[in-house]
Amino acid sequence: MKNPTLLQCFHWYYPTGGELWREVEALAPNLNEIGINMIWLPPAYKGASGGYSVGYDCYDLFDLGEFDQKGSVATKYGDKAQLLAAISALRQHDIAVLLDVVVNHKMGADEKEPVRIQRVDQNDRTQIAEEIVECEAWTRYTFPVRAGKYSEFIWDYKCFSGIDHIENPDEDGVFKIVNDYTGEGWNDQVDDEMGNFDYLMGENIDFRNRAVTEEIKYWARWVMEQTGCDGFRLDAVKH
């Protein structure tokens, strides 16, 4: 396609109430007339803040507004049926669809578990303390409401390289998790801001764990099959 035009069909301050997917469906017939041939939709899955989530506090990638998790069934933008109707309407009018995706971190874990961490200088992430601290952290994602539908994968501390809060002792900061995959420190295929900008927020997903990589690839295939979207806009790539 020569000179395609992409419309970002959302913004950070879009109101709660679950109306965006309906609005997108209604817009679909007129977009080509004004030269729009590709739409960028917000994160469509459940965030840690449920129906208030913009989508960047990723909780459950497999909940597209289908399960009563984090205080709501629908996301901020609507439920799964409304999402599918919106994408179907766009495709019927030859509008390509990109979904915004956050696979850098997760938030809103279901359980805490014992972990070992090393404290990190927040302004220079290459400065990692030698002391290993025994503590607890909210790093276990079991998705009890979804109960294994679509995926039975359980996320735990081995899936993450860093966190920003620990308990027993109770501290906030930047902490590198000690597990089988983090012995060499942070992932080095990242921006060098803060010395190493692998860690951004929440529970930092570690793609050095092959099980994690395979789960994300499985999800990408699943969501394209479920929704009919054409591709993704990847958030936080430099991390």
Image (cartoon, helix red, strand yellow):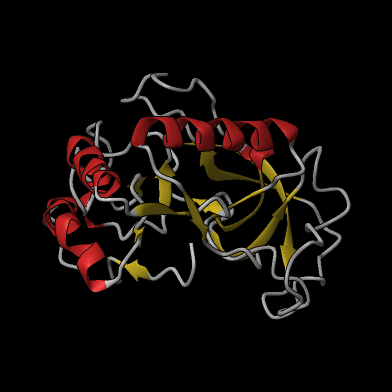
In this rendering, the answer to whether 201 lies above or below 12 is above
Q: Is residue 108 visible?
A: no
Give the left or right position of residue 61, taking residue 140 as reference: left
Q: Nearer the viewer, residue 27 or 187?
A: 27
Q: Nearer the viewer, residue 11 or 24?
A: 24
Which quarter of the figure has residue 130? bottom right
Give the left or right position of residue 7, taking residue 153 as reference: left
Q: Which residue lies at the image location 27% right of the left edge and 67% below the top edge?
A: 10
Give the left or right position of residue 115, taking residue 21 as reference: right
Q: Which residue lies at the image location 49% right of the left edge and 52% below the top edge?
A: 232
Q: Nearer the viewer, residue 116 or 42?
A: 42
Q: Which residue lies at the image location 52% right of the left edge and 62% below the top edge?
A: 235
Indicate the position of residue 57 as horizontal and vertical percent values.
Answer: 41, 56
Give the left or right position of residue 185, taking residue 144 as reference: right
Indicate the position of residue 219 as horizontal and vertical percent values.
Answer: 51, 34
Q: Which residue lies at the image location 27% right of the left edge and 36% below the top edge?
A: 69
Which quarter of the figure has residue 125? bottom right
In this rendering, the answer to whether 144 lies above or below 68 is above
In this rendering, the answer to whether 160 lies above or below 114 is below
Indicate the position of residue 78 as horizontal and vertical percent values.
Answer: 18, 47
Tell how many labels: 0
Q: Quadrant of the C terminus?
A: bottom right
Q: Is residue 26 visible?
A: yes
Indicate the position of residue 221 as horizontal and vertical percent values.
Answer: 52, 33
